[in-house]
Image: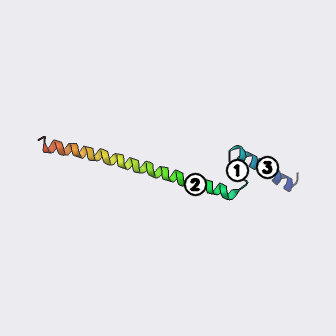
Amino acid sequence: MTEHELKKVVSEAVAETLLQLGIDASDPVEMQKDMAHLRAWRESVATVKNQGLVTAIGILVAGALGLLWLAIKGSP
């Protein structure tokens, strides 16, 4: 098997594998754009998750401080 034949076989195998995974490798620029979009989406989801956690902790701390203030001040 010549080097050219080997490269052709490997190229076809890779293209078929990517296609089975749902990736159209016939247009690499579009594939790169899709991957960039997925990365941006993943990063934005992580940011929302972190901000949600910070907000939840803030609410719990504010509630605990409010209870402490009421306990110290006493009921009217």
As measured in the structure, the alpha-carbon distance from the residue carrying label 3 to the one carrying label 2 is 27 Å
Q: What amino acid is labelled 2 in the image?
A: His
State yes or no: discs 3 and 2 in contact (Cβ < 8 Å).
no
Badge 3 or badge 2: first in the primary sequence? 3
Coordinates of residue 23 in the picture (x, y in percent): 68, 48
Is 23 left or right of 8, judged from the image as shown? left
Task: Identify the residue position indicated by label 1 in the image.
Answer: 24
- The disc placed on residue 14 is none
Farthest residue toward the bottom?
Answer: 29
Q: Choose between 32 and 3: the one closer to the eye.
A: 32
For the residue carrying disc 3, how many other residues have a C-alpha within 10 Å: few (<14), some (14-19), or many (20+)? few
What is the x, y in percent for residue 68? Answer: 20, 44
Q: Residue 20 falls in which quadrant of the image?
A: top right
Instruction: Identify the amino acid type marked 3.
Output: Glu
Q: Residues within 10 Å of mark 1 (few under 14, many from 20)?
A: some
Rounded to the nearest whole Å, what is the CA distance between mark 1 and mark 3?
A: 13 Å
In the structure shown, which secondary structural element does the residue marked by tag 1 occupy?
A: loop
Taking the spot 61% from the left edge, 54% from the top edge, the residue there is 35
Q: Amino acid at mark 1?
A: Asp
Instruction: Tell me, for residue 37, which label it has, or none.
Output: 2
| Residue placed most toward the observer, 9 or 62 | 62
Q: Position of residue 18 (x, y in %)?
A: 71, 47
Q: Nearer the viewer, residue 13 or 55?
A: 55
Left or right of 11? Residue 72 is left
